[in-house]
Image (cartoon, grey):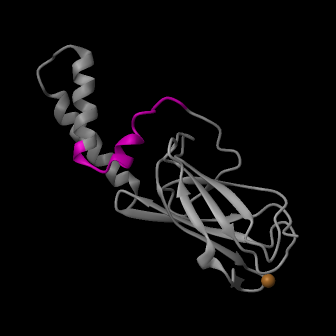
Amino acid sequence: MKLHSCAAFIFAALIALGCDSKKDESSKHDDHADAAVQADDPTCAATHEHMGLHGDLSGFTASAAGAFHVKIEWNAPLKASSLENKATVTFVDEHAEALPLKLTGFKLFMPSMGHGSSKADQMVLTQDKDNANVWSVAGIYFSMGGAAGDWVVDVEAGGCGSSDKARVSIPVEVQ
Ligand SMILES: [Cu+2]
């Protein structure tokens, strides 16, 4: 299932720790962080370290099962029959908090014609060193031009042993 299962697991772990005898608050927080990281995938634990910072979801697309929200920012202008196109992919949760995920799929598709990229194998996906929720995608090849909205990207990403997907429209022309 989704990231929620991870959240539930961590929550249970925190409750268990909460039954321990009262010590000073700071050491208790340390215990919680260690337990969360050891008990599960670090990417899952990380989603709980930023609670309370609610940001802006405008520009993001919700995934099919609600596991993440994704935004794709494009270099401009986009050009057909070129490998120079690049994009930046950002994942956040429903509170617009950074959500570290592994980007496992970035598939161009043109729904009106039923085809994708003819050089999809040229793409390079790279996770940002400092922001685990941000990926850069290079070598994006559009087989043909299109008006804004003609092309979409089927994004797939995972964490916590699960994955989810989102179809993101490309809101600019491919020349
Ligand atoms: Cu086409």
Residue 96 is a magenta residue: no
Q: Position of residue 128 (x, y in %)?
A: 54, 49
Q: Quadrant of the C terminus?
A: bottom right
Is residue 169 positioned above or below 75 on the image? Answer: below
Q: Quadrant of ligand 1?
A: bottom right
**Number of callouts:** 0
Q: Residue at x 22, y 34 (%)?
A: 15
Is residue 27 positioned above or below 172 on the image? Answer: above
Q: Position of residue 80 (x, y in %)?
A: 82, 74
Q: Residue 169 versus residue 75: which sits nearer the camera?
A: 75
Q: Position of residue 27 (x, y in %)?
A: 22, 20
Is residue 174 positioned above or below 136 on the image? Answer: below
Q: Which residues are magenta?
A: 38-53
Q: Report whether 129 appears left or right of 10.
A: right
Q: Residue at x 49, y 64 (%)?
A: 164
Q: Residue 131 versus residue 100: which sits nearer the camera?
A: 131
Q: Report whether 172 appears left or right of 1.
A: right
Q: Residue at x 33, y 51 (%)?
A: 6
Q: Quadrant of the N terminus?
A: bottom left
Residue 47 is a magenta residue: yes
